[in-house]
Image: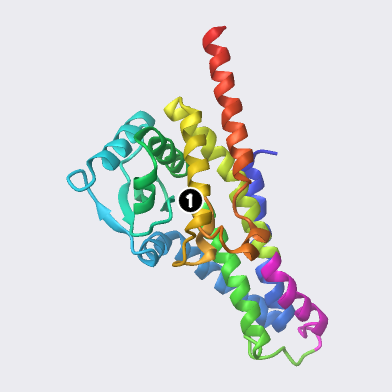
Amino acid sequence: MTNRIKTVMLLAGLTALFLWIGQALGGHGGLMTALVFTGVMNVGAYWWSDKIILKMYGAKPVDSSQEPELYGIVQELVLQNQMPMPKVYIIPEKTPNAFATGRNPEHAAVAVTAGILEILDRRELKGVLAHELGHVKNRDTLISTVAATLAGALSMLSNMAMWGGMFGGRSQTSDHQSHPMAGLVGILIAPLAGALIQSAISRSREFFADEAGAKTTNDPLALASALAKMETYSKRVPMHHGSPATAHLFIINPFLGEQFLRLFSTHPPTAERIKRLESLAQKQIGIIHS
């Protein structure tokens, strides 16, 4: 099964779960309301999620005169990949990290924290930016944002249902009446299932972006070194602003300091990512020597 097919299936499963809890809580009326909400969430995620996330983290746009090295690296990489130039932002955070967002390569943005510019050298920073542009090129940013939006909506729906029935009560007719136990299961299970599905999408995508970035720079060890540094610093200085619902967008989970969130890790273990990058470097050496 290809990664694209698996992602489509996961997104379909997340949407179906949203519809199921709507029906469980409100019968036919709840199902229709959930269907409308799902459509609104998807449309909103497609058109405005990038602007919302950038504003959430206080990202400031920069150009070549303000950040010549950062902007120059991005220009170099997009030319190499034959991609449109994304907007470049800096987030005023000490935690070293980066993410890409946008609905497609023509409307993309790459954001890095102030902290990452302090701890990475040019070679490592290039590896990180190549990884993020890999997400843009593969359109991972749209998929991840839609998954996060729907998972967040599931959690919101369940919380509201617990406080009084989001859909104004079940239908009184026997044909459309929802089962009380089904509603209870939906309230308890939907947020958990949504988080797990979102995590599954994000974890698989990180490996592909790592590989894409390493192949672009032809330097897998640079990204491996950057990942090791960022994880070490993130444990010391985790991000305290923003929302854990956006953790999957970052190259390293910025909320590593919060133990509970590790249960729903949106990233594969950094040690495993580094191991794969080191293996890729060994293969490149073997090709050169063969």
Horizontal and vertical percent for residue 9?
A: 67, 51
Residue bearing the label numbered 1? 233
Farthest residue toward the left?
65
Residue 197, placed above or below residue 285: below
Which residue does the image show at 70% across and 67% down from the upper left? 192
Q: Is residue 276 left or right of residue 243?
A: right
Residue 81, placed above or below residue 156: above
For the N terminus, the image quarter is top right
Q: Is residue 126 left or right of residue 144?
A: left
Which residue does the image show at 50% across and 34% down from the upper left? 212
Residue 251, visible in the rendered structure: no
**Residue segment shown in magenta:** 174-192
Horizontal and vertical percent for residue 188?
A: 74, 75
Residue type beneath disc 1: Tyr
Secondary structure of the magenta portion, mostly? helix
Horizontal and vertical percent for residue 146?
A: 53, 59
Residue 80, placed above or below residue 264: above
